[in-house]
């Protein structure tokens, strides 16, 4: 070899690296909405006009390296999304969403192995926080007709309800349900008489047999997911109302009682918001107060509510980070709704669409939408109302399955 080698590193083996730091830097400024990158390269990502999804190689070897630079300091306005293309990213599989949203950020990732996958060597000390993939399907279960039932109805990713599935577990009503583990669900508690048993739901929508519960047996309580993969059951009555809660870990195990914070009550509803927090609101005695739940499952003190005080309503997450409370009873059945933003602020009443009713249930579905279903308005109902990803409630859809009330619902499955 003759001549002068510039901007190269002479490795101990005598091999000349391709460039400084062993990387080839792209001569092209990436401005498109998508780009597929290769190991051994550095890229300038300009998101001035749009978000950019960056697809990593589908195969990699230990030590493979890729660097991404915020060319125009605009990632805070238009983020980058990394598609790990079948490989893990910081130990999470590629169903998780990887986003970088800080202006002026640079991301230097190195492939480790099949277990941890790509790991950030540097990312401007901005912590990586994986966002669990949204649930795509829902399940309505249990409730009462002229007597208690344990049947379920699955909701597909388009919001279509399936016919009855013969239930597993003790028939009961006034229970609660929530998503846990990212893609599974749990039904628990109920009555009457009050019980503390639970039934887990797999990511295929299969309901398991009874598990002896932990915590005080009660009914007319609420439940919601929090912390991306856990759940919380709270409040309810055994004949006298309570404010205690029970946390559920990401394996579906219910913890013992936690002394409650806030006004003891029953007939309330709960939902997740802000991607990792939860909110309990409204309830018996016709109140409109709320209690926010942190991403570590801590219940906050009462906050005076907004909207018509009522009981026996339902709530669900929509739009991935917002929530909606709807319907219920206050001297008569109502069809109004109240939206909750990503900060947990409850908005004023919105005149409802669809049949006024109480004792219904709601769940998220399709990644960013919600559905209210069933309930009571003399007689029991099986109709549903879909909620768009902007919180708009649609007109009644004639229901499928046994009309009933006092049931519960939750999202499951990260596959459409």
Image (spheres, helix red, strand yellow):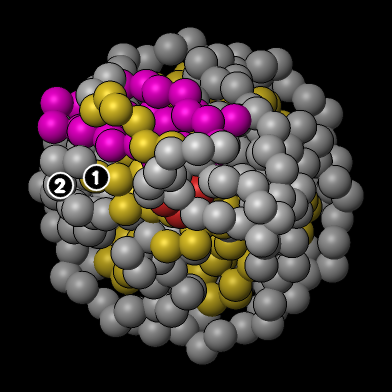
Q: How many marks?
A: 2
Density class for disc 1 (Cα within 10 Å; few <14, some 14-19, many ≥20) is many
Residue that protrudes farthest toward the front in the picture = 2
Residue that protrudes farthest toward the right in the picture = 209
CA separation in Å, label 1 and label 2? 5 Å
Q: Nearer the viewer, residue 73 or 363?
A: 73
Density class for disc 2 (Cα within 10 Å; few <14, some 14-19, many ≥20) is some
Q: Nearer the viewer, residue 351 or 72?
A: 72
Task: Residue 332: name its quadrant.
Answer: top left
Q: Nearer the viewer, residue 31 or 170?
A: 31
Queried whether the magenta region covers residue 257, the answer comes back as no
Q: Is residue 290 above or below residue 20?
A: below
Secondary structure, mark 2, is loop
Residue that protrudes farthest toward the bottom in the picture = 259
In the picture of the structure, the residue carrying the numbered disc 2 is: 73
Q: Is residue 250 above or below residue 390?
A: below
Estimate the x, y position of residue 383 in percent, counting from the top left: 48, 19
Task: Residue 72: name its quadrant.
Answer: top left
Q: Image point 43% across, 79% down: which residue?
A: 298
Left or right position of 143 against 331: right
Q: Nearer the viewer, residue 236 or 305?
A: 305
Q: Image point 27% across, 20% down: which residue?
A: 32
């Amino acid at each position: 070899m003759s001549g002068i080698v510039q901007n190269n590193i002479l490795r101990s083996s005598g091999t000349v690296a391709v460039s400084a730091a062993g990387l080839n830097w792209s001569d092209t400024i990436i401005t498109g909405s998508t780009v597929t990158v290769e190991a051994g390269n550095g890229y300038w990502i300009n998101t001035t006009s749009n978000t950019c999804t960056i697809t990593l190689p589908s195969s990699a070897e230990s030590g493979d390296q890729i660097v991404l630079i915020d060319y125009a300091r605009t990632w805070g306005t238009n983020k980058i999304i990394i598609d790990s293309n079948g490989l893990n990213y910081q130990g999470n599989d590629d169903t998780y969403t990887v986003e970088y949203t800080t202006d002026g950020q640079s991301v230097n990732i190195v492939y480790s192995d099949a277990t941890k996958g790509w790991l950030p060597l540097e990312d401007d000390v901005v912590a990586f926080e994986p966002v669990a993939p949204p649930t795509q399907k829902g399940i309505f279960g249990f409730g009462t007709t002229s007597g208690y039932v344990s049947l379920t109805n699955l909701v597909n990713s388009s919001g279509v309800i399936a016919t009855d599935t013969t239930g597993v577990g003790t028939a009961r009503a006034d229970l609660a349900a929530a998503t846990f583990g990212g893609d599974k669900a749990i039904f628990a508690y109920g009555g009457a008489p009050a019980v503390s048993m639970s039934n887990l739901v797999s990511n295929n929508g299969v309901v398991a047999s009874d598990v002896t519960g932990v915590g005080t047996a009660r009914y007319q309580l609420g439940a919601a997911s929090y912390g991306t993969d856990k759940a919380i059951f709270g409040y309810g009555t055994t004949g006298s109302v309570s404010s205690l809660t029970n946390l559920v870990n990401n394996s579906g195990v219910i913890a013992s009682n936690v002394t409650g914070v806030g006004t003891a009550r029953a007939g309330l509803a709960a939902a997740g918001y802000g991607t990792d927090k939860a909110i309990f609101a409204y309830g018996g005695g016709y109140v409109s107060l709320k209690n926010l739940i942190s991403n570590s499952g801590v219940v906050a003190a009462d906050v005076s509510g907004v909207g018509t005080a009522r009981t026996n309503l339902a709530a669900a997450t929509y739009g991935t980070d917002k929530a909606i409370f709807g319907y219920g009873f206050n001297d008569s059945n109502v069809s109004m709704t109240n939206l909750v933003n990503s900060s947990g602020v409850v908005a004023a009443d919105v005149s409802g669409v669809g049949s006024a009713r109480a004792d219904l249930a709601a769940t998220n579905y399709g990644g960013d939408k919600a559905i209210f279903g069933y309930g009571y308005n003399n007689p029991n109902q099986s109709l549903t109302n879909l909620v768009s990803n902007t919180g708009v409630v649609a007109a009644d859809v004639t229901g499928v399955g046994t009309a009933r009330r006092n049931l519960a619902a939750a999202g499951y499955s990260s596959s459409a």
